[in-house]
Image (cartoon, grey):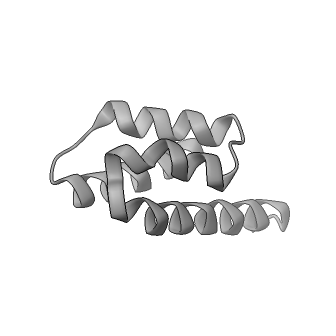
């Protein structure tokens, strides 16, 4: 599942920043792996993504919830 998240994060980061940022993708993936709460993830990304950080984090965690529920339901 982490490759799905990494691909999505990479695409969104590139859209927001205008260029690929593999180190940022890795950092966000690590935050997810460590089960960082959304508020902490937002705070960590605010200096980089600025005004886009809130929307990015909301979409990211919606995807996490969806994928978690999908896996739990064995779909």
Where is residue 51 drawn, in percent x and y?
35, 64
User: How many labels sit on residues?
Assistant: 0
Using residue 15 as the reference point, say whether residue 68 is left or right of it. Answer: right
Q: Is residue 53 above or below residue 45?
A: below
In the image, 12 versus 2, the foreground residue is 12
Query: At 59% across and 38% down in the image, what residue appears?
Result: 31
In the image, 45 versus 24, the foreground residue is 45
Where is residue 2 drawn, in percent x and y?
57, 43
Where is residue 52 drawn, in percent x and y?
36, 64
Using residue 16 as the reference point, say whether residue 46 is left or right of it. Answer: right
In the image, 48 versus 57, the foreground residue is 48
Query: At 40% across and 40% down in the image, what residue appears?
Result: 25
Quadrant housing the C terminus: bottom right
Using residue 8 as the reference point, say whether residue 72 is left or right of it. Answer: right
Name the image quarter holding residue 22: top left
Q: Is residue 27 above or below residue 18?
A: above
Where is residue 35 drawn, in percent x and y?
72, 42
Query: At 53% across and 39% down in the image, what residue appears?
Result: 29
């Amino acid at each position: 599942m982490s490759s799905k998240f990494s691909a999505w994060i990479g695409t969104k980061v590139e859209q927001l920043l205008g260029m690929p940022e593999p180190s940022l993708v890795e950092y966000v993936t690590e935050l997810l792996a460590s089960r960082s709460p959304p508020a902490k993830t937002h705070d960590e990304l605010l200096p980089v993504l600025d005004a886009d950080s809130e929307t990015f984090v909301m979409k990211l965690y919606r995807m996490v919830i969806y994928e978690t529920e999908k896996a739990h339901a064995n779909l």
